[in-house]
Image (spheres, rainbow, N blue to C red):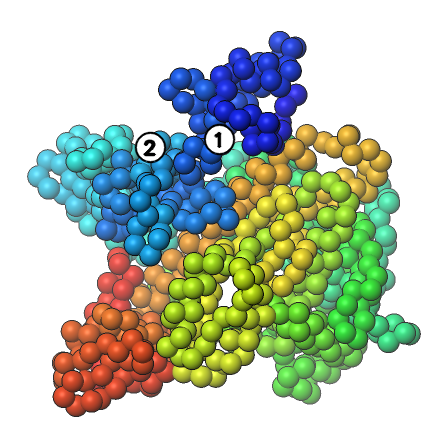
Amino acid sequence: MAEREEIFAFMREVAYKPLTAEEFVEAMELEDTEQIGEFLKLLAEMEKRGDVILTRKKKYGLPEKMGLVVGRLQGHNKGFGFLIPDNAEEQDVYIALEDSNGAMHNDRIMVRLNRKQGKDNRREGEVIRILERANKQVVGSFEQNGNFGFVVPDDQRIYQDIYIPKGEIGGANSGDKVVAEITKWPESRRNPEGKVTMVLGKAGDPGVDILAIIKKYKLPEDFPQEVMEEVNQISFEPAPEAYENRKDLRDVQMVTIDGEDAKDLDDAVNVKVLENGNYSLGVHIADVSYYVEPGSELDNEAYKRGNSVYLVDRVIPMLPSKLSNGICSLNSGEDRMAVSCQMEIDQKGQVVNYEIFPSVIHIDRRMTYTAVKKILVDKDKEVREEYGELVESFEMMEQLALILKQRRINRGAIDFEFPESKVKLDDQGKAAEIIKVERSIAEKIIEEFMLVANETVAEHIYWLDKPGIYRVHEEPDEGKVETLNEFMHNFGYHIKGVGNEIHPKSYQEIVEKVAGRPQERIINTVMLRSMMHARYASTCLGHFGLAAKYYTHFTSPIRRYSDLIVHRVLRESWENKEARGKMPTWFKKMDNFADQTSIRERVAEEAERESVDMKKVEFMERHLGEKFDGIISSVLPFGMFIELDNSVEGLVHVSAMADDYYEFVEELMAFVGQHTNKIYKLGDRVEIQVVKVDKEARQIDFELV
């Protein structure tokens, strides 16, 4: 039976022209009726996905060979958009409003490339087919207008309002947050039409804002009944036979180190120094694959969710709490089944030996980042006495983490340091406080240990010569690097490259040069935006940002489906050491797993970021008219963004700079007063007043004091 990849290979390498279904069957030498039926079904699925195109003459061809590109539309609030191609190596395609042909933000589309290139040689195209609609439901604010109404989408990338005809208002009143189902898709001169299916509440009421985000991103709130029925069959006490063929590490002293409020504890660690002076590092990860059977209802639901989503006030887990916070969580004082990666690491940070195996472990202590910081940084006598038997182990962990970090930096890994913050909520769910989060050696220990374990496991599964799933990060697009260099030229910096080859070390050199300088934040931000977005793939393509040839995600199977798949690949290698030909059917779905986990990760990132940004805006709403100190974090032709000490950013529009007429000087990245010669440039400290807060648009306006 032909598989998807075989069809691709045949069309790319053998077929010199599009073929009819009959010609395909003959060329692929399929004779069995059942095989032919399955093949035609697969071909139809591929055509629906946009993998192949069916021409008017009923011939199947490859889009890439016919001037067509397939991907998702990233909309803009002015109506135009960009096609983000499925093939990450391809450039984005600009789609003008008049060429969108009814496509909406996030729709999966097929685009015909225009022969003429747009400005800056960017690719332009026209939507010729909408393969999959993404916005069957839209969350927004309802506005009544006589007998009918409109829903103004919360997502500004859906630039058209949804027309709601008489009789479809569903009891909504002006100012309500609602969910609208689209019943007619937009056309060239007509807005989409829909009906209100749910009223979430008045905008501004407690909890309505987060509920709107949950509905907007279609995040699942509850687990289906059939999933919970399966979960209820899982025993909290593993049967004795479950420990068979597992290495018993219950006598090995190990700890978890997490934030105070973490409940899903994926990883435990232990370190010791060997007689030869090398370090022995054990990274022990919850064996979720033991409990989640491939193809089960629980597995299907985890696949749909793709990952846990951490909103500002709650977690929407990938797995039910009985697993995520219970039997799979590495809680202290409990025996747990794990997958262990035991590594011997020399004084240069090289893994010289390793073993990966199923284990049973027992956590001695559940540590927090705060407690470990008190031990290692603050040298807090009381805390060091409380954890006396572990202090030496933590000191070894610190030594090893610093060695591992130096090894990464030496090979060229990029180490951006962006300030982080956390929003604390009151009892009503309102933003009460914004706290800057300082990353100490405690967080860095876990980060370095997880990175080296992920690299080790990635190389291991690569050499198994079996299908796998990898975390990949391709080299930056050449055009984006050129644009980046044009921008950085104003500051005297330049990304070096030989021919088309860019080494991550070139980026890291700039990171080191700008560290502590006024332009650090803006340079790092622009460099980050010039890079590709990391994703999952069934092929090991390396990780540019980490300067790693092999990389995967292995360390968080409770909250990431990609990691669960990696654990299954390892389990399969232990249980079926022979025969590549006897692989289970789920091995054939690696491309699907990679695509789905990449898509769900993007959704989670957007939802998480929006929930935090919304609460930051809400916090500043309470401080209208108040004055704050801040730093000019970026300077653009229309104004300056000011970052406050609490990490909130707001805009001082050039029209609000009323003590002079100010001119934007790109070479200086500054505004210069025409009469006073007063200069506002990147990194300058300024005092501002909060003059306007728009929670719906997530915008804050400042004025200089």
The secondary structure type at the circle numbered 1 is loop
Q: Residue at x 56, y 65 (%)?
A: 498
Q: Residue 62: which disc?
A: 1
Picture layout, residue 94 above or below residue 234: below
Q: Is residue 559 left or right of residue 699?
A: right
Does residue 528 appear left or right of residue 158 in this picture?
A: right
Residue for point 31% across, 38% down = 126
Q: CA distance from mark 1 to mark 2?
A: 15 Å
Name the image quarter holding the C terminus: bottom left
Dot placed on the residue nearer the N-terminal end, 1 or 2? 1
In the rendered view, does 155 fall on the left or right side of 625?
right
The answer, for residue 420, to whether it is visible in the render is no
Q: Quadrant of residue 352?
A: bottom right
* 595 horizontally vs 255: left or right: left
- SS of the residue under disc 2: strand
Q: Quadrant of residue 669?
A: bottom left
Q: Residue at x 66, y 69 (%)?
A: 411
Closest to the observer, 166 or 521: 521
Do the CB atoms of the residues marked 1 and 2 lie less than 8 Å apart? no
Q: Which residue is mark 2?
A: 128
Q: Looking at the image, is 357 positioned above or below residue 409?
A: above
Marks 1, 2: nearer the viewer: 1
Packing grade of label 2 (10 A; few <14, some 14-19, many >=20) is: some
Type of the residue with mark 2: Ile
**Going by the picture, which residue comes out furthest to the left?**
146
Residue 694 appears in which quarter of the rendering?
A: bottom left
Please state which amino acid type lies under the numbered disc 1: Leu
